[in-house]
């Protein structure tokens, strides 16, 4: 094996950017990101940066990694002994098949780490289409968690399905036959992503035994992680993956050389969520893109007729419509997450050059993004089930898309015979609310501290709970239960400001306020703006805050001037 080139200087963020650029080109089909041709001169040299055209991804500032620091954070290319100073449980390290799945290093260890993330096996066409509920059976749903374990516990306790005396590692299901749907985006922006998944997976297994169910849906952040795009991950979250997954693989394998194939792009996180990765078989394949429970269809961002109609059919004998559009999407997602692995692991880290490392990581990302099904793909502004905002934007208001009502009515008709409403997360709201004459329910309340620290709320649906067999809908909060008809979307509390996408603003002066004039929004007093497209901070400004959905909205009751991350 040749030694590492003497003058090589590798930039961690550069490697991430190059890998992401390849993934984004096919992953974010609606964006203008393009494939980037990688050359040796672009990545190798003494303190040399590659000038890459900006993409829509927000990336951390570059940081040089010298040969010395590469040896500290990556497998040691210089060592042929195999152990690399890693405390080991392996008697014959490096005898693992270099192309074998890394899951073999975790699934059989004495603590059986991967089993803690196991969801109950699901049958597509059955478990994602549950229309025959008992009269009075409870269905509860909550939105984006984003790695905040406190927010997750608050959701679960408010829903009445988690024993408040139980611990995070040993939670106790208290929901009986309640069906709970979490509408995606457990990942990113927080420090406890794996802990959240362990808690949810444990409860889901207990719920099944109790006659209930806990269903997890894909969100756009699960799709991003599966494609190797980690621009929204917190450093604390990455450390959790390192401590929980990475160190265990190092210990079982007797080496850390397996990390090199990921080219510095969060090896532990990428190995966990990529197709065919550590969590694919026991957890990800049992998650859904969308599901029907009773008279409600649940999805992360939204559904349209085009998502569903191609999968529906008609029984030739009876003429009865068969609603299989949702099951078709779930089948595509399952097949992809199980089988779309690039098949070229290099667990020994047997690379001879920087180019080989980069090419291996790029191929890994390219295979995942090119094969990703449309139901999981997209990007900001895309119309896929995990990215669209036609029914939820502006937040707390009726949708601005004039065709939204017609779109959702058609989608509900294609979702099932008696489906009356669509429940979605994705776009943070001030509180759970309904729009489009009760057909759209928006339940992401930005509860994570990585978003806006909103108050957790849970949507409760009592199947045929009324005397006339109609459903009863309530909103559960920490302090009360309120009938859902009291919180429709409103056009009075919020003022929308359309821009292409403004992610950051500076703190205004205390007397600043937002006004509207001839459709143009402006500030009464001067406000100093940071680089709106590539600023270094995300800032809450009084009652004004920003979203990544290319809008700024006015909210009541948000704390002023607090610097924080925004969803």
Image (spheres, rainbow, N blue to C red):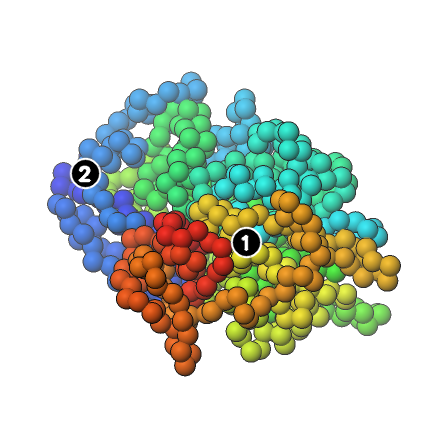
Left/right of residue 52 with respect to residue 394 in the rendered view: left
* Mark toward the start of the polypeptide (1 vs 2): 2
Left or right of 199: which side holds 262?
A: left
Identified at 35% across, 72% down, the residue is 522
For the N terminus, give its image quadrant.
top left
Q: Residues within 10 Å of mark 2 (few under 14, many from 20)?
A: some
Residue lying at the far right of the rendered structure: 467
In this rendering, position of residue 11 left or right of residue 276: left
Is disc 1 surrounded by few (<14), some (14 to 19) or many (20+) residues within 10 Å? many
Q: Position of residue 148 (x, y in %)?
A: 50, 42
Considering the image in quadrants, where does the C terminus appear? bottom left
Q: Mark 2 sits on what residue?
A: 66
* Viewer-closest of 210 and 451: 451
Q: Residue at x 46, y 35 (%)?
A: 102
Residue at horizontal 35%, vertical 44%?
265
Residue toward you, 59 or 160: 160
- Callout 1 touching callout 2 (CB < 8 Å): no
In the rendered image, the residue lying farthest to the bottom is 518
Residue 369 location, x and y as percent? Answer: 44, 56
Which residue is at the front of the view, 255 or 452? 452
Provide the residue designation for mark 1: 445
Instruction: Decide if residue 176 is in sight here.
Output: yes
Residue 183 relative to residue 209: left or right: left
Q: Nearer the viewer, mark 1 or mark 2?
A: 1
Q: How many marks?
A: 2
> Which type of secondary structure does the marked residue at label 2 adopt?
loop
Looking at the image, which residue sits at the far front? 511
The answer, for residue 18, to whether it is visible in the render is no
Residue 166 percent across, percent down from the top left: 63, 29
Label 1 secondary element: loop
User: What distance separates the C-alpha of mark 1 from that of mark 2?
Assistant: 43 Å
């Amino acid at each position: 094996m040749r030694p590492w080139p003497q003058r090589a200087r590798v930039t961690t963020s550069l490697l991430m950017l190059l890998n992401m650029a390849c993934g984004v080109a096919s992953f974010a089909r609606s964006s203008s990101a393009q494939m980037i041709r990688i050359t040796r001169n672009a990545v190798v040299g003494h303190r040399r940066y590659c000038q890459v055209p900006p993409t829509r991804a927000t990336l951390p500032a570059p940081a040089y990694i010298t040969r010395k620091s590469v040896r500290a954070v990556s497998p040691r290319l210089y060592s042929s002994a195999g152990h690399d100073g890693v405390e080991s449980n392996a008697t014959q390290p490096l005898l693992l098949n270099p192309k074998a799945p890394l899951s073999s290093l975790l699934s059989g260890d004495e603590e059986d780490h991967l089993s803690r993330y196991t969801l109950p096996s699901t049958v597509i066409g059955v478990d994602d289409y549950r229309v025959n509920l008992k009269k009075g059976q409870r269905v509860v749903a909550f939105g984006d968690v984003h790695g905040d374990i406190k927010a997750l516990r608050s959701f679960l306790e408010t829903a009445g399905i988690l024993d408040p005396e139980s611990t995070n590692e040993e939670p106790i299901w208290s929901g009986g036959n309640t069906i709970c749907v979490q509408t995606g985006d457990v990942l990113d922006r927080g420090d406890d992503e794996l802990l959240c998944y362990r808690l949810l997976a444990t409860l889901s297994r207990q719920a099944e035994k109790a006659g209930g169910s806990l269903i997890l849906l894909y969100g756009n952040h699960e799709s991003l992680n599966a494609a190797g795009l980690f621009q929204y991950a917190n450093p604390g979250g990455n450390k959790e993956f390192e401590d929980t997954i990475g160190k265990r693989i190092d210990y079982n394998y007797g080496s850390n050389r397996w990390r090199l194939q990921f080219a510095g792009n969060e090896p532990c996180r990428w190995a966990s969520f990529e197709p065919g990765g550590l969590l694919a078989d026991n957890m990800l394949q049992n998650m859904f893109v969308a599901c029907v429970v009773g008279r409600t269809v649940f999805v992360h961002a939204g559904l349209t007729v085009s998502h569903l109609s191609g999968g529906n059919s008609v029984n030739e004998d009876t003429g009865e419509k068969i609603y299989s559009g949702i099951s078709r999407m779930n089948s595509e997602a399952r097949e992809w997450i199980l089988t779309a692995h690039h098949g070229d692991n290099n667990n020994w880290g047997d690379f001879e050059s920087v180019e080989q490392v980069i090419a291996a990581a790029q191929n890994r990302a390219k295979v995942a993004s090119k094969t990703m099904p449309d139901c999981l793909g997209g990007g900001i502004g895309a119309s896929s089930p995990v990215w669209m905002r036609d029914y939820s934007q502006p937040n707390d208001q009726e949708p601005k898309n004039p065709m939204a009502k017609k779109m959702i009515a058609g989608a509900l008709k294609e979702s099932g015979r008696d489906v009356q409403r669509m429940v979605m997360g994705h776009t943070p709201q001030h509180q759970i609310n309904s729009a489009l004459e009760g057909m759209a329910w928006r339940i992401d309340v930005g509860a994570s501290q990585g978003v806006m620290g909103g108050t957790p709320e849970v949507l409760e649906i009592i199947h045929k709970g009324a005397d006339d067999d109609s459903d009863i809908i309530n909103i559960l909060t920490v302090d009360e239960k309120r009938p859902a008809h009291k919180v429709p979307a409103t056009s009075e509390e919020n003022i929308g400001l359309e821009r292409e996408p403004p992610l950051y603003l500076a703190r205004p002066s205390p007397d600043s306020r937002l006004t509207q004039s001839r459709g143009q929004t402006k500030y009464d007093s001067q406000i100093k703006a940071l680089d709106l497209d590539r600023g270094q901070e995300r800032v809450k400004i009084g009652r004004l805050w920003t979203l990544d959905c290319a809008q700024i909205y006015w909210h009541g009751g948000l704390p002023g001037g607090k610097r924080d991350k925004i969803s």
